[in-house]
Amino acid sequence: MAFDEMFTADGAVRPAYAKVAEWLDATTPEQLERRRAEAELLYQRGGITFAVYGDHEGEERIIPHDIVPRVLSSQEWSQLARGLEQRVRALNMFLGDIYGRQRALSAGVVPEDLIWRNPAFRPEMMGVRVPHDLYVHIAGIDVVRVDGDSFYVLEDNLRTPSGVSYMLGGREISIRLMLDLLNSHRVAPIENYPNELLETLCSLVPNRAYGDPTVVLLTPGQYNSAYYEHSFLADKMGVELVEGHDLFVRDEVVFMRTTEGPRRVDVIYRRIDDAFLDPLTFDPDSVLGVPGLYAAYTAGNVTLANAIGTGVADDKDMYSYVPDIIRFFLSEEPILKNVPTWRCREPKDLAYVLDHLPELVVKEVHGSGGYGMLVGPQASKAELEMFAARLGAHPENYIAQPTLALSTCPTFVDSGVAARHVDLRPFVLNGAKGIHTVPGGLTRVALRQGSLVVNSSQGGGTKDTWVIEC
Amino acid sequence: MLSRTADSLYWLSRYIERADYIARVLEMANRLSSLPVAYGGSRNEWESAIVTAGCGPAFFEAYDEPTAKNVTEFLVESERNPASIRRCLETARTNARAVRTALTTEMWETINSAWIDLKTFRATALTSRDLPRFLSWVREVSLRVDGSGYRTMLRNDAYWFSRLGIYIERTNSTARLLDTKYHVLLPEHSPVGGGLDYVQWTAILGAVSAATAYHWVYKESLKPWLVADLLILREEMPRSLAACYANIVTNLDRLARAYGRTGESQRLARSIYTAFGNSRIEDIFRRGLHEYVGAMIGSNTAVGEAIERQYLA
């Protein structure tokens, strides 16, 4: 039985949801439907869309937004936030260590080959000092809830996590359409996220820069699935949204082409993967990047956020070592739990996984977006057999976890208001002046009954997340 | 600002203005082609529309006959015509999406809504009954885009580049209209009957929203050389060549002041603008209206290229 965030097992409403429950009782399905339709219209008119790769029909889609908010009490939140920040601090130190002295490897905290064989490991970064020793400036940590007391971390996203525009868009919807309910609570504000992001980015300015730092957001362009978010954030921060060909490097300094001639760039919030950043150093076929960017970066003339090579610390294989990484670097016990994980690369674990496949969730180590994943209890016999074969052939590509009963929240669907499974992606900002998590995050909801897959590319929706005083 | 941003703003405006102009050309063709031949209605009206729209060669690659149906289809929604109204609005929206950060919410929503609404006007729905409704919708879109920009954009380089796009495109439109219709404006043109001239001149004035303005300016009955005067030299007429250049010079000067640098585009535009002030319509007719307008299209293209070299590359 999944943990219901609104109701206790005997059907009583939990205190945090008291007013939501009252409001839902007083609102007819027609009224809900009208607000839902209005929300959809707002998204459509605003062009708040994402692209689904490999989908020929619509190049742009909107993510369904569920207007019923998800509520967390401020006590629950502060515990969660402390855990998230602890995790990001440790992972940041771990990255400095991987590309530096490698104490964690010599101490056997993490097996060496997990680094060397990892495609996200960037040998070019060995020995490169990054400004303020910060690698991860923006992190999105996916967490799920399985009972009243504990959050489990599902995944660390340390490369270019997206979704924050949907978090902010959801709040905008609440302000415009749910003001009655919103105003009956005291909800922690999140609107200052772009401002805090800008402050974080400005704090990362390379030591050699002079004058006011110039920050830009580097996007792969308008056909990227997250382009809306890129333009949204650039707009809210008041920085230029640049594409690779808007930038050039001269004498290891990055400039952008402007109507007034070249202008120096100090900090790049890049939403392009490592491999495409610089065709001279990484993928030579990339047309998205900037030739010479890597040289300017290692010369300390420009800061990239996040740093190059952070992906080595966030894949699903490394995930299972994070609690040990926290203990090793911070000498603290992890505040947030990890989901128990079987590493299929280890024969003992593989045998267990193959024996218990129908109960487990199997994930590709380097996969993302809910692709290449097996949800055992919902898989057909053929799918199970196919995955068993894949596991046998390339066990090192997979990990397995028990099927978590993700918590549920009231959600407005075709049949009315019903419980649907949710996760949460809070966003952690880690700058030279400190680490901070905006209260709440992006709640993703699996709109199909019983479904546990919340990814937007797989039929998931979003919800506004309210951290309330109660 | 980024050169690419300036470029997108400039072209965004040009494409919206172009869609508006194509809608006007189609309205004019519909009006004129519905007249009996003796009143100046001619089967050539649709061919003339294609030329006025500036896409003659592309049309004859796609179709054999300039029939009403073919021309309407080509100018309204053809995928093969980069200047069809549909493609113009789509390109404008692509440009807008590329520079969302430089647009106000109001402007973006106006353009994006137009793009969404466009889908409701399917090709099949563009029957002669629905066409007028569609064309006036297109003109409304350009009014809304123009108005939302005027009302909400900061008066900085982003605004100036978007205004430049409007006026460079509009100069081209008015000049092309004059170029294909110059023969009915010539004083020596021998009238078949008052009806022909009147309807042709009214159609031209209608295409530039100036039918009433004419009477306010000249306070006399329609004279072809005055129609030409209004469209070329009268600065108070917002679609005249002189008015377009007054705006081009103003916006280029603002850019030059803000950037602290004057360049080729400013010099070229200023010399064109000065020439309007020193011209009389009689002189233009003496030199030849057709030649004058042809040279104007050329100079305007040169200014456009200078702007691109100076700021957008």
Image (cartoon, helix red, strand yellow):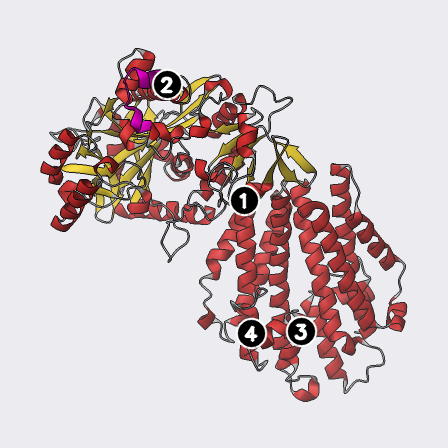
Q: Nearer the viewer, residue B271 or A14?
A: B271
Q: Residues within 10 Å of mark 4 (few under 14, many from 20)?
A: many
Question: For residue A393, which quarter of the picture?
Answer: top left
CB under 8 Å between discs 1 and 4: no
Give the CA distance from mark 2 to mark 4: 70 Å
**Mark 2 chain:** A
A160 left or right of A322 in image:
right
Q: Which mark is residue B72?
A: 4
Q: Which mark is residue B51?
A: 3
CB under 8 Å between discs 3 and 1: no
Q: Amino acid at mark 4?
A: Thr
CB under 8 Å between discs 3 and 4: no
Q: Secondary structure at mark 3?
A: helix
Q: Which residue is mark 2?
A: A102
- Residue at x 54% of width, y 62% of height: B87
Q: Nearer the viewer, residue B142 or A157?
A: A157
**Mark 3 chain:** B
Membership of A112 in magenta stretch: yes
In this rendering, which labeled residue sits more in front, label 3 or label 4?
3
